[in-house]
Amino acid sequence: MTTTAFPNLQSNPAGAIPVYDVAQAYGGASYSLTTTQLATLTTVKSSGGTLYAVDVYNPSTGIGYLQVFDAVGVTVGTTLPSLSLPVLAASAREFVFGDSGVNFVNSIQIAATTLPTGSVAPNAAMVVNAIYK
């Protein structure tokens, strides 16, 4: 996973993913790109923060769920996620949480599964872009 502070761009460069405009709109929010998201827990931010938007591509042949956690000691499939975001098979979906975003006290962690609170990975890894502070 790569995490980088977002540069202050005036416009989207040719071919850029539109999610970058969202980061700029939130005053220099950071972004992360996870290209191999499966049921394994991935930390987007290791301390409390605010999640403003998530862009998810699900190449799987079945519906997938991006589970988002605000907890310490998460066990995927046992720990109840704070959010469970559905993405249809072979499609992309953008979740924008508005100007206030969704606040996380402990951390922002994600996992991709085949059920809203399950532990089984989809048959292909999701691509996840997260905009957060």
Image (cartoon, helix red, strand yellow):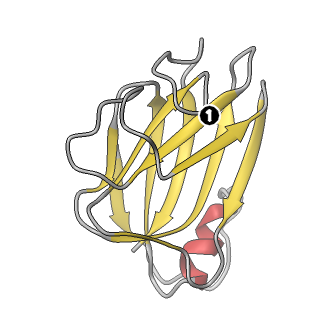
State the quadrant of the C terminus.
bottom left
Q: Residue at x 60, y 11 (%)?
A: 123
* Quadrant of res 125: top right
Q: Amino acid at mark 1?
A: Tyr
* Quadrant of res 111: top left
Q: Residue at x 46, y 25 (%)?
A: 38
Image height check: is 26 above or below 63?
A: below
Q: Residue at x 66, y 78 (%)?
A: 98
The residue beneath circle 1 is 65
Q: Position of residue 14 (x, y in %)?
A: 71, 62
Q: Position of residue 83 (x, y in %)?
A: 55, 51
Left or right of residue 67, residue 16 in this image = right
Image height check: is 126 above or below 19?
A: above
Left or right of residue 71, residue 96 in this image = right
Q: Residues within 10 Å of mark 1 (few under 14, many from 20)?
A: many
Image height check: is 119 above or below 133?
A: above
State the quadrant of the N terminus.
top left
* Quadrant of res 103: bottom left
Q: Secondary structure at mark 1?
A: strand
Image height check: is 121 above or below 93?
A: above
